[in-house]
Amino acid sequence: MPNVLTEAAHLSCAHGGRVGLAASQDLVRIGRVPVLVRPDLLGRPIAACPHATPSTPPCLQTVVVDDAASYSGFVTIDGRPVAKATAQGRTDWSKLGVVPFGVDAAGQDFVSVSE
């Protein structure tokens, strides 16, 4: 069962750049840290992506989120599905939206979702 993602989660692009996270809800927290919900993973900034070339910039933000892999189909907060540790999507690298991003750590080990 995948863990629920919190604002303390670590997500990164395939090159190792860090996805910046901010929860859009503050009703539910795990260990005083807000839980992430849809659409918290979309349009997030990416810092320190090392994969810049003379013709392409580094990954700068998340542009596509795989809803089925990223959000619970059953557990919601205020009607919005919670984000899961199986979250994945793509970044804007080279404007093609082909570089994946994913979860390195959920930010907590106490709460998981069963689908």
Image (cartoon, helix red, strand yellow):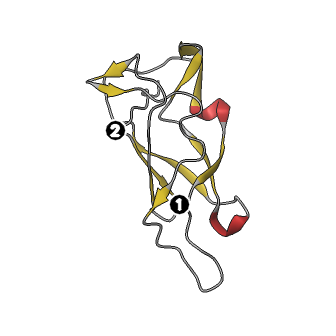
Residues at marks 1 and 2, CA–CA distance in whole angstroms: 19 Å
Type of residue at label 1?
Ala
What residue is shown with label 2? 8
Identify which residue is drawn at 64% across, 77% down: 56
Q: Is residue 3 shown left or right of residue 42?
A: left
> Horizontal and vertical percent for residue 92?
65, 60
Q: Is residue 87 above or below residue 83?
A: below
Identify which residue is drawn at 52% across, 47% down: 102
Identify which residue is drawn at 60% across, 42% down: 42
> Horizontal and vertical percent for residue 65?
64, 41
Q: How many numbered discs, if any?
A: 2
Q: Quadrant of residue 22?
A: top left
The reply to whether the C-beta atoms of the residues labelled 1 and 2 are less than 8 Å apart is no
Describe the element under mark 1 as helix, strand or loop.
Answer: loop
> Horizontal and vertical percent for residue 114?
51, 17
Q: Is residue 18 shown left or right of residue 99?
A: left
